[in-house]
Image (cartoon, rainbow, N blue to C red):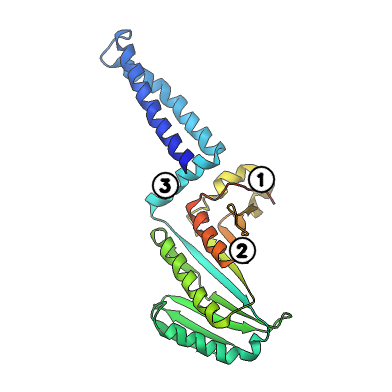
Amino acid sequence: MKSSVAIFLGHIVGVVILLFVGLFLNDAITGKYAGVITVFSIAIGIYTFALNFLYRSNATFHFFVNRWMLFFRKTHTNWKPLFTLSKANIAQESKEQLKLIWIEFQKGIHGKAVKADETSNSVEIVLDDNIRLIIRILQDDSGGCLTMGFSQEILVPSHLYGEYIERLRLMLESIVNIVKPDNVKCGIKIVFRSPQRNPYFGFFVREAPARALLIFRLSLEGFPSSNCRVDVGIDEINIESKDSTSAFACLKHVLEMDFLDKRRSR
């Protein structure tokens, strides 16, 4: 971010220098303000070429520009989270666990809750009439697990990213406090619907062979001190982590496009 600000300030300084050069040449060039017009008309071609080159070759500047473009477009993304809480013998306690979870959501902490469906090993809860949360308990080789997923993608406006990240964090925290799992696995898919384009795709597409673009997929290391795995596709981004704190922090950094300190092609 600091380097992006430095680049922005550098552009302002460059424009000011061009202005003074143009004024200085006024005496040498015939016509009122001809020096300013001449210098700027020549410089603008060089300047736009330099900006275009910087946009395509410098990750910091590329995502600085994209971040502001997303801000002014007031765009949105679609999220599809899935959290898996593993615990031995949880399948034997499924009815009790699901009952306690429903009681927790009935309190209204996470929004107006309505029970839409219920089976012996699952419960579907509608929050605020637009988020359909599915809690399901499954038997597996390790003894069992509880999954917290959503039947539909959640449409999240860009100005509410932080609010929704906190909302997901609190939902997961409530269930973790009830289940007390041995470990937690987090998966969050971010989908960019047409006519939007994944802002990461435009920069990394130059690193892939042309024949590979139809199945474009890039695997990235998370931001420093993170154990997240981030997969980037043409119109989606997948985040996976065994640490919920890192998962939500990585989600924030991905949406703000400032986590690319390290990257690797897959």
Name the kind of residue labelled 1 in the image.
Ala
Q: Give the crowd class for mark 2: few <14, some 14-19, many >=20 residues within 10 Å.
A: many
Residue highlighted by disc 2: 240
Please name which of the two marks, 1 or 2, marks the residue nearer to the observer.
Answer: 2
Q: Is residue 249 visible?
A: yes
Give me the residue at 63% from left, 52% from top: 220
Asked whether 53 or 221 is in front, the reply is 221
Q: Is residue 119 visible?
A: no
Residue highlighted by disc 3: 68
- Farthest-out residue, right: 141
Q: Which mark is on residue 208?
A: 1
- Where is residue 92? Give x, y as percent: 65, 91
> Which comes sooner in the sequence, label 1 or label 2?
1
Name the kind of residue labelled 3 in the image.
Trp
- Relative to 126, residue 82 above or below: above
- Relative to 206, residue 165 above or below: below
- Where is residue 229? Give x, y as percent: 63, 59
Asked whether 132 or 164 is in front, the reply is 164
Element type at mark 2: strand
Element type at mark 3: helix
Give me the residue at 42% from left, 58% from top: 158
Give me the residue at 61% from left, 64% from top: 241
Q: CA distance from mark 1 to mark 2?
A: 23 Å
Q: Is residue 41 left or right of residue 181?
A: left
Q: Are marks 1 and 2 in contact (CB under 8 Å)?
A: no
Q: Give the crowd class for mark 3: few <14, some 14-19, many >=20 residues within 10 Å.
A: few
Element type at mark 1: loop
Q: Is residue 89 left or right of residue 46?
A: right
> Which comes sooner in the sequence, label 3 or label 2?
3
- Where is residue 181? Give x, y as percent: 61, 78
